[in-house]
Amino acid sequence: MTNMTYFEAQKRASFLIKEKNLDKEVARLFLMEMFGFDNTHLLLHYRDEMSSQDADRYFEWVNQYLDGNPAQYIIGSTEFYGNRFKVDSRVLIPRPETEELVEWVLNDFQESPKLKVLDLGTGSGAIAISLSKEHPDWDITASDISKDALEVAKYNNEENGTKVAFLASDLFDSIHEDFDVIISNPPYISEDEIDYMDDSVLKHEPKQALFAKNNGLFMYQSIANYIKMKKYTTHGTLYLEIGFKQTEAVTRIFTESLPDCQVTSRCDFFGNPRMIRVKY
């Protein structure tokens, strides 16, 4: 690996990655992340020679990716809503479509100086921390059943300089307050969808954050049952990410449990129905 330029290293890595039918742009991403380059500085360094140690380290990342490890776990962090988050196998990698769920809340409540928000099943803390970054005045609590995930979320909270409160809770078991807004990207994948999923997701991301019983609908039913108990004393707005084939089923769960609620569905950037809002 000696006497290889940055450009040659990226070219070789791209070839190896393409052979595996993986995203060859990861070769460029790894160079930028490993050496702290932006696009301009990467171009400026393309013709520079890499040290043998740097080349070995770079291709160690590439080989991990070729073995099926998610790029974000190899790097150890990812971007979400303009902020940086530590991610590892204890938490789900936050996806771009979840940014649109955050945006929906921010647009609906942009004029609200005070708001009590619950991020249910926070994982890396990406949703709660992103909301807190935009509205430091909001009172935001993030919960998760996984204490390992909460460790990651607390680290991200500190690194991002936000003041999210964290709570270990199996759904609403340890939650004793009422909230103006509840937002969640819950597990919603049915076990019978395993054959259609990417191997790297199945092998490396936490299954507890991916799969739900009852054809992927268990969490929505549980949330609806909780809100049903509260409907005579508490009113608010619920924002949920859903599977792209679940709009009808999830809408029915809430309209049957809460006949007076207003359910609105929304498509993501790609035109897939991936979010619902429930006003109760």
Image (cartoon, rainbow, N blue to C red):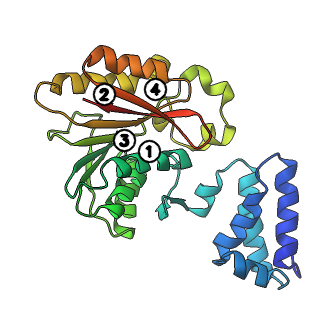
- In the image, is 240 to the left or to the right of 64? left
- In the image, is 33 to the left or to the right of 160? right
Identify the mark nearer the N-term, 3 or 1.
1
- Badges 1 and 4: C-beta atoms under 8 Å apart? no
Judged by depth in the image, the label closer to the viewer, 1 or 2, is: 1
| Rendering quarter of residue 119 | top left
Q: Which mark is residue 113?
A: none
Q: Which residue is mark 4?
A: 212
- In the image, is 142 to the left or to the right of 60? left
Closest to the observer, 176 or 103: 103
Judged by depth in the image, the label closer to the viewer, 2 or 3, is: 2
Q: Which of the image's four quarters has the C terminus? A: top left
- Badges 2 and 3: C-beta atoms under 8 Å apart? no
Identify the mark nearer the N-term, 2 or 4.
4
| Residue 145 visible at all | no
Q: CA distance from mark 2 to mark 4?
A: 13 Å
Q: CA distance from mark 1 to mark 4?
A: 20 Å
Q: Which mark is residue 121?
A: 3
| Rendering quarter of residue 31 | bottom right
**Amino acid type of the residue tagged 2 in the rendering:** Ile
Q: Which residue is mark 1?
A: 101
Identify the mark nearer the N-term, 2 or 3.
3
Residue at 35% across, 62% down: 134
**Amino acid type of the residue tagged 1 in the rendering:** Leu
Residue at 51% across, 41% down: 206
Pinpoint residue 227: horizontal percent, then vertical percent: 23, 27
Q: CA distance from mark 3 to mark 1?
A: 14 Å
Identify the mark nearer the N-term, 1 or 2.
1
Residue situated furthest front in the rendering:
111
